Amino acid sequence: MTDGPSQVLLKVWKTLGGTDSPLHSIHWTRPLRPTQYVCSLAAQRAAMARLATVARPLCTALDSLMAGTGRSPFRVSAAPVGGELTVDTFVDCFAELAPRAGLRPVYDCESVKWLLEMAARKTYLGDLHRVRVRNSANEVVGWYLCYLKRGRSCEVLQMAGRRDAIELVLDHLFYHAWRNGAVAVSGRLQSDFFEALKAKRCLFHGAGSPLLVHSRERGLVDAVRGGDAFLTRLDGEWWMPFLRPGRSPVSA
């Protein structure tokens, strides 16, 4: 399994008998500061980088005006109660709240500790935030892991929630990202969140890297492609590159 391939690798993979997972190759984005988000996309293009720099103060002012408009589709509501997601609480939450898919990771405290320590080192993506979400009855109903850096998109590694609290988890994620200066929130689609993401006016697209899978056990491939698998970015290598794009090596 790989979830960080280039289009060249995708062609090679399929030529050699591998396949992709269409469902897990869909990505979503929820703009939080829409004009600053467009500006950040423009800044990634060499021809528009200077214009994006000049336009940034205006974009900031426009987003502030829109945020104060009660009917703005980009308005972010105040979040429910949250707290830090520790290694122990992650393992407990996963056992209790993660979707009962036919194929899903097996986590224990040692493996989760290693994963979170390694993920936290990839600071070029932003600071790793580990958050558990509670409802009004103070019950833990979900969690999320994401990278946050002010002025950039918040990238979600993993999220999960009780079936009746999916929107609550998203509300907390969006508010938390907004409070920390993110211009948008992006992630790879998890099927149990599809309806809630659609209701929250998220944009669905194929701009991110696809998920490629291969196994001699056809049932495993069918489970992934059929959506009967809980596989998130945390379980792949999307966040693990040893080289920053166009930069010097990053320590492992």
Image: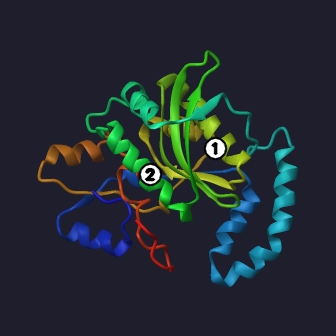
Q: Position of residue 67 (x, y in %)?
A: 82, 46
Question: Of the numbered discs in the image, which one, if any, rests on residue 201?
Answer: 1
Please, which residue is most extreme toward the bottom here? Answer: 47
**Which residue does the image show at 72% across and 67% down from the upper left?**
39
Q: Do we see residue 45 in this rendering?
A: yes
**Which residue does the image show at 77% across and 79% down from the upper left?**
51
> Mark 1: which secondary structure?
loop
Are the residues flagged by discs 2 and 1 in contact, CB closer than 8 Å? no
Number of residues whose C-alpha sits closer than 10 Å to that of mark 2, classed few (under 14), some (14–19) or many (20 or more): few
Residue 78 shown left or right of residue 81 in the figure: right
Q: Quadrant of the N terminus?
A: bottom left
**Which residue does the image show at 71% across and 47% down from the upper left?**
178
Provide the residue designation for mark 2.
117
The amino acid marked with disc number 1 is Arg
Q: Quadrant of the C terminus?
A: bottom left
Q: Position of residue 24 (x, y in %)?
A: 38, 50
Q: Do we see residue 23 in this rendering?
A: no
The amino acid marked with disc number 2 is Glu
